[in-house]
Amino acid sequence: MELQSPEATRIMVAVNESSMKGYPHPSISSRTAFEWTVSKLVRSNVAEFRLLFLHVQVPDEDAFEDMDSIYASPEDFRHMKERERIRGLHLLEYFVGRSHQYGIPCEAWIKKGDPKEIICSEVKRVQPDLLVVGSRGLGPFQRVFVGTVSEFCAKHVECPVITIKRKPDETPADPVDD
């Protein structure tokens, strides 16, 4: 009797852009969560795992910050939406590229909306074996105003959740930055 190999363990990693100004890069928390997943879970067993990268784009309430005028045409809005889409693709390209460097099979996609709600609905839809999210390590005061996606997901998703904190030496002056 031949033993069948088990299906790969599917790990969803919720990733986001850095909130600091400049060209979009992965947030510190997202990079830390990815690197932790690779070094502590996947290790050299790349064939046993499949990474699922989810990036949730929050509708930009300050979309006009990139414009020189409060007067906008429909074309301006099309350009803003296209720039947002491209930024999301660049973010996912980073994680997919890193996964391929390690030889880890992966998938990646973008959804729009409230990260807390979207991550929970995508976990329900995709049914990963595990969800990994980064945490900015906000103190109790900041948590009240900013809220934490990781805490919300840990309470509401139907799979195990691992929350990865930033390393102390990677924490910016303002912990809300990431």
Image: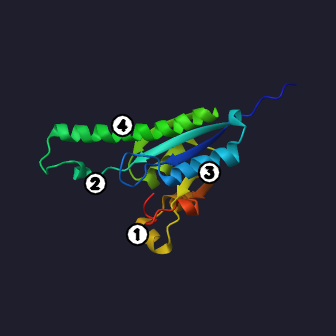
Name the residue that disc number 4 marks: 86
Quadrant of the image for the C terminus? bottom left
Residue type, numbered disc 4: Ile
Query: Which-is-in-front pick, marks 1 and 3?
Result: 1
Q: Is residue 178 above or below residue 9?
A: below
Query: Which-is-in-front pick, marks 1 and 4?
Result: 4
Name the residue that disc number 1 marks: 145
Q: Is residue 100 above or below residue 140?
A: above
Q: Are marks 3 and 2 in contact (CB under 8 Å)?
A: no
Q: Residue 175, image x and y in percent?
A: 46, 65
Q: Is residue 20 above or below residue 147?
A: above
Residue type, numbered disc 1: Phe
Disc 4, SS: helix
Label 1 neighbour load within 10 Å: few <14, some 14-19, many 20+: few
Residue type, numbered disc 2: Glu
Q: Residue 7, image x and y in percent?
A: 70, 34
Name the residue that disc number 3 marks: 159
Name the residue that disc number 2 marks: 61
Q: CA distance from mark 2 to mark 4?
A: 18 Å
Label 4 neighbour load within 10 Å: few <14, some 14-19, many 20+: few
Residue at 50%, 53% (x, y): give it.
28
Disc 2, SS: loop
